[in-house]
Image (cartoon, rainbow, N blue to C red):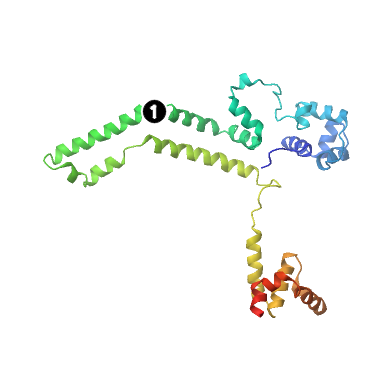
Amino acid sequence: MKQGITIQERLKDLRTERHLKLEELAELTKISKSALGSYENDDRKEISHKSILKLAEFYGVSTDYLLCATENRNRPNAGLTELHLSDDMVELLKSGRINNRLLCEIATHENFTALMTDAEIYVDGIATMRFQDINASLEAVRAEIRQKYQPNVSDAYMEEDTTLKALQASQIQEEDYFCHVTHKEWDAILHDIRLAHEADAESAPDDSSTLKIIADVEKAMRFPGNALDKFCYVMCSQLQISYEKLTEKERTDLKNIMKKSGIYRDSPLGSRKR
């Protein structure tokens, strides 16, 4: 996802959040549909002062938020003391080294509170004594079983007993437990955010251009004709031209041009001919 957002994107986001069509927004704000459409799609369109004030009032945001001068809708002047941010954190947020918008989405996700809670429990060692108690209880059970059934057999031999092995394996390592829990919470957060941005223009498309080229080459290999025909077939596929529908003259002209291409001469098809 992008670090920043344009005014056009912000206006469209605010409208779609309220599930409004341009016609409905025009009726509610008394701003023409054509003007609203141009505000959302034309980055060279100047928005009138009157429209800025109307739209900010309608959406319940500040004009600074509407014009992308801030990311804060309701608290444009929150103080650093109130936010409890360290100097290093402030410098990081100002540096541009990370995507602040993505950080905000992560921190405001519904699972983030649980992630922070579990992280604090682990970092502060709040549950350490509980894990020690559980493991000590399991160790006591192991000792009791050894004493009850084979009191004279060495511990080394008894370690081979299936029951004792199971009890030993049941011991819980605090670090392993919290890594597992926080990993699941973190995965859920990233998964949801990725889904939310699947339709973004800057997000990677689901289909791979490399896979398409491979498929085109495989199809070209089945196409009747010589190596040059197959090469022209692949190139036409990439340009969304149907090679089969070209006239004989068009194919001949295209092949004469492609013969001069260094890409063809260096390709496996061109090399095969040589």
56 vs 257, nearest the viewer: 257
Q: Residue at x 49, y 29 (%)?
A: 117
Q: Which residue is mark 1?
A: 127
Picture coordinates of residue 176, whole percent (x, y): 40, 38
Left or right, residue 8 beside residue 213: right
12 vs 272, nearest the viewer: 272
78 vs 38, nearest the viewer: 78
Q: Quadrant of the N terminus?
A: top right
Q: Quadrant of the C terminus?
A: bottom right
Asked if residue 38 can be seen in this view, the reply is: yes
Indicate whether 126 appears above or below 166: above
Picture coordinates of residue 268, whole percent (x, y): 64, 73
Picture coordinates of residue 186, whole percent (x, y): 52, 39
Picture coordinates of residue 187, whole percent (x, y): 52, 42
Q: Residue at x 26, y 44 (%)?
A: 165
Furthest-left residue in view?
152
Query: Quadrant of residue 190 in the image?
Result: top right
Kind of element beneath mark 1: loop
